Amino acid sequence: MSSSSITSGGVGERGVPSKCACGLDVKIFTSKTQENPGRPFFRCVSKRDVNTWTSKRDWVEDAVFEEVQDALPRLSIIANEISKIKAEVNEIDAMARKSEDLYVRLSKRA
């Protein structure tokens, strides 16, 4: 299962597509069908006639849902890394306070 980002999704990938199978950009259009009136979908900019569409219709909400699904594990990893960095910063801060206290005590002796 591959993942994509909003800017790099491609043909056959999960998430928001950026390119059609033909290599051209994909844009958001609005469905005018009775089954899905007003529903946004992705389509190649060159495919004006519905009969020339070669790929399945990608609904915007499905693509966004996939983006969120793919991002959640990465967000968890980032949150874990942030927690580790905060702990390291707290350790360094404590060491700096100890060094400052030691400096003050040594200065008073001199």
Image (tube, grey):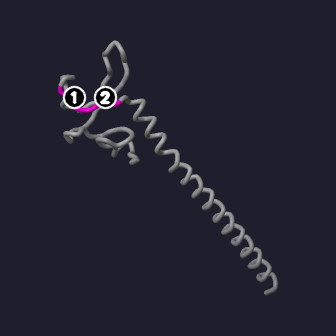
Q: Residues within 10 Å of mark 1 (few under 14, many from 20)?
A: few
Q: At which x and y percent is residue 49?
A: 18, 23
Residue type indicated by callout 2 = Arg
Question: How much space separates mark 1 and mark 2, taking CA atoms?
Answer: 9 Å
Report whether 88 appears left or right of 8.
right
Q: At which x and y percent is residue 92?
A: 66, 69
What residue is drawn where x is 68% and y is 63%?
A: 90
What residue is drawn where x is 19% and y is 39%?
A: 22
Label 1–label 2 contact, CB within 8 A? yes
**Main SS, magenta residues:** loop
Return the mark for residue 53: 1
Q: At which x and y percent is residue 93?
A: 68, 67
Q: Quadrant of residue 36?
A: top left
**Up/down of 66 relative to 90, above or below:** above
Which quadrant of the rendered structure holds the C terminus?
Answer: bottom right
Q: Does the magenta segment cover residue 104?
A: no
Report whether 62 appears left or right of 50.
right
**Farthest-out residue, front:** 1
Return the mark for residue 38: none
Look at the numbered disc 2 and give the secondary structure of its residue: loop
Residue in the foreground of this view, choosing between 75 and 92? 75
Residue that carries the numbered disc 2 in the rendered image: 57
Residue in the foreground of this view, choosing between 62 and 101? 62
What residue is drawn where x is 33% and y is 27%?
A: 41
Residue type indicated by callout 1 = Trp
Q: Quadrant of residue 39?
A: top left
**Up/down of 68 relative to 53, above or below:** below
Give the magenta-colored segment's residue range. Answer: 52-58
What residue is drawn where x is 27% and y is 35%?
A: 26
Q: At which x and y percent is residue 18?
A: 30, 40
Look at the numbered disc 1 and give the secondary structure of its residue: loop
